[in-house]
Amino acid sequence: GEDVEQSLFLSVREGDSSVINCTYTDSSSTYLYWYKQEPGAGLQLLTYIFSNMDMKQDQRLTVLLNKKDKHLSLRIADTQTGDSAIYFCAEASGGYNKLIFGAGTRLAVHP
Amino acid sequence: NAGVTQTPKFQVLKTGQSMTLQCAQDMNHEYMSWYRQDPGMGLRLIHYSVGAGITDQGEVPNGYNVSRSTTEDFPLRLELAAPSQTSVYFCASKSGGVADTQYFGPGTRLTVL
């Protein structure tokens, strides 16, 4: 079945770049997403990428997609303390209505 | 425009009790869904609905029932709560289409003793 895997924890210094990685198994996934969850809150969509794209940039966020290796990454430039959160990778499955989530990567930003 | 709202925010149940988690959205979205979030496991889809009167099972439907009598509301019912259902529950909605954003509610933290 479908599976999405992420590393569980990442620690970076304020001002550095953060790179969060994700691998997925469903080669038919058309859209891949990155969600952010702050403590005690629901999930907020950060960005998404269509499977026929290699890269998408949105302000400080850069998404890279390697479809051959089924690898997705999220780069956050100039990471700030407000970026501390859990980041979830997700793939759309079964007609775009079902999201398969990874376990989430907890990003800790320290001074 | 309140988005997706969920009640209650917190709930403690005893094993065998029943309750309904409420979810409502005011964006006229056709698609709604329920997820549970457990530590180290991400979110897993419980049930979803593509419109009023239509529901379907997700990845982990056992022990949960849903109904969709209106576009706005999508309640999740636990008939016989079990400790394994201790989790954080999120409701989400989207309008449909290929890349439409799923909007998540703030979550309900449920503990079953």
Image (cartoon, grey):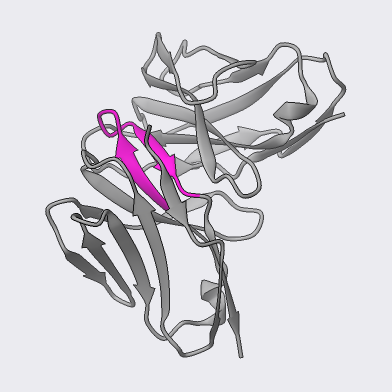
Residues drawn in magenta: A89-102
In this picture, residue A51 sits left or right of residue B106: left
Q: Quadrant of the image for the C terminus of chain A? A: bottom right
Find residue A21 and report its horizontal and vertical position in percent: 40, 65
Q: Main secondary structure of the magenta part?
A: strand
Q: Which residue is at 65% across, 25% downward? A: B21
Up/down of A12 relative to B83, above or below: below
Q: Which residue is at 47% across, 36% downward? A: B92
Up/down of A92 relative to A70, above or below: above
Find residue A81 and report its horizontal and vertical position in percent: 57, 80
Q: How many marks?
A: 0
Up/down of B44 relative to A102, above or below: above
Find residue A7 and report its horizontal and vertical position in percent: 50, 62
Q: Nearer the viewer, residue A75 or A40?
A: A75
Q: Which quarter of the picture shows residue B101?
A: top left
In this picture, residue A63 sits left or right of residue A68: right
Q: Which residue is at 64% across, 59% downward? A: A39
Q: Is residue B57 magenta?
A: no
Q: Quadrant of the image for the N terminus of chain A? A: top left
Q: Which residue is at 71% across, 33% downward? A: B8
Find residue A97 and report its horizontal and vertical position in percent: 32, 31
In this picture, residue B60 sits left or right of residue B110: left
Q: Which quarter of the picture shows residue B16?
A: top right
